[in-house]
């Protein structure tokens, strides 16, 4: 109650499911941020018809552009009064034309996180809060046919581990949590086979991608969003969680961290 959220990539897929699940769990209001105006307005209208006209605000923004991210946060805070939760979900697959993928997946997560700190930090007139960055299990175990996508999600994971460290949480009162979806039946996943790495790198990239997906248990965006609510209830800042195959597991990096200490 009296909590407000902002969700990027909220017009469809995982983002839309998260907006709806937050509303089902009683959140006071959500800003649905998306680059697709038509889809964003349609999704907002659908949610408003279910939960009421005052519960959802649509804001257009391309998360690859810093100014548009900042404007979306500013408009959201002006509308609701404050923010308590940010879910950075906007992302894309673009292996061959890779610059937009870097700007959207890496730049969008980074700018969304930094701007979330700006508005929620107790050191900057905020009242604390939580930032959730949506990465992928492919940021931990790469899809060899999607090296760009896998790399951007590895960036997102390390961003959350770094800015979620106790030194930042203790100072700002803002948790940063990273969640890694497994195979989730979104439009992005269904179209991804046509967006894999160039056949010039290897002739079988598309076949490798399809084989990788076929070997995984799928989940719906709605199932992912429900499990995310359980993560929000228990996750400490800086932790990374896999939500895959309708199961939740915390990713343990302790042995890797210990090995890195030995090498330093």
Image (tube, helix red, strand yellow):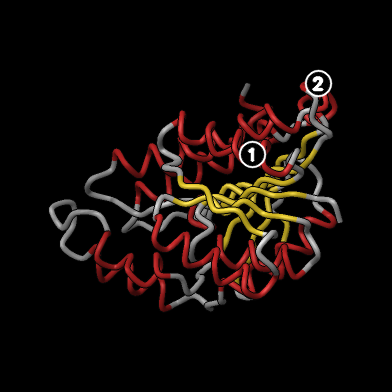
Who's the residue at 63% across and 41% down the image?
Answer: 76
- In the drawing, does residue 126 fall left or right of residue 187? right
Discs 1, 2 touching: Cβ within 8 Å: no
Along the line of sight, the residue nearer the viewer: 91 or 200: 91
- In the drawing, does residue 47 fall left or right of residue 233? left
- Work out whether residue 145 can be spotted: yes
Name which quarter of the figure residue 158 lies in: top right
Residue 123: where, in percent of width, then height? 81, 21
Name which quarter of the figure residue 44 lies in: bottom right
Residue 34: where, in percent of width, then height? 47, 52
Q: Nearer the observer, disc 1 or disc 2?
A: 2
Along the line of sight, the residue nearer the viewer: 39 or 196: 39
Query: Mark 1 highlights which residue?
Result: 160
Who's the residue at 63% across and 21% down the image?
Answer: 264
How would you rate the neighbour count of disc 1 (Cα within 10 Å): few for under 14, some for 14-19, many for 20 or more? many
Residue 132: where, in percent of width, then height? 66, 48
Who's the residue at 62% across and 68% down the image?
Answer: 48
The vertical placement of 243 against 30, above or below, is below
Along the line of sight, the residue nearer the viewer: 261 or 150: 150
SS at badge 2: helix
Query: Mark 2 highlights which residue?
Result: 123
SS at badge 1: helix
Locate the N terminus by quadrant: bottom right
């Amino acid at each position: 109650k009296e909590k407000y959220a902002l969700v990027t990539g909220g017009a469809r897929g995982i983002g839309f499911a998260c907006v709806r699940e937050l509303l089902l769990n009683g959140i006071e209001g959500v800003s649905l941020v998306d680059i697709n105006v038509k889809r964003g307005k349609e999704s907002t209208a659908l949610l408003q018809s279910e939960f009421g006209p005052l519960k959802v605000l649509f804001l257009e923004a391309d998360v690859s552009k810093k100014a548009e991210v900042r404007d979306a946060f500013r408009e959201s805070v002006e509308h609701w009064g404050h923010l308590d939760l940010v879910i950075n979900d906007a992302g894309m697959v673009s292996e061959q034309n890779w610059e937009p993928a870097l700007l959207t997946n890496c730049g969008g997560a980074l700018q969304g996180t930094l701007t979330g700190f700006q508005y929620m930090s107790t050191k900057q007139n905020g009242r604390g809060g939580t930032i959730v960055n949506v990465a992928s299990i492919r940021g931990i175990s790469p899809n060899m046919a999607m090296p760009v996508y896998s790399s951007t999600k590895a960036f997102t994971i390390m961003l959350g581990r770094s800015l979620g460290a106790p030194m930042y949480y203790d100072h700002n009162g803002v948790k940063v949590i990273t969640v890694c979806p497994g195979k989730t039946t979104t439009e992005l996943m269904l179209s991804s086979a046509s967006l894999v790495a160039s056949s010039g790198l290897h002739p079988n990239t598309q076949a490798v991608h399809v084989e990788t997906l076929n070997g995984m248990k799928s989940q719906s965006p709605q199932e992912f969003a429900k499990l995310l609510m359980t993560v929000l209830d228990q996750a400490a800042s800086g932790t990374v969680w896999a939500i895959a195959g309708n199961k939740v597991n915390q990713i343990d990096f302790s042995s890797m961290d210990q090995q890195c200490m030995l090498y330093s």
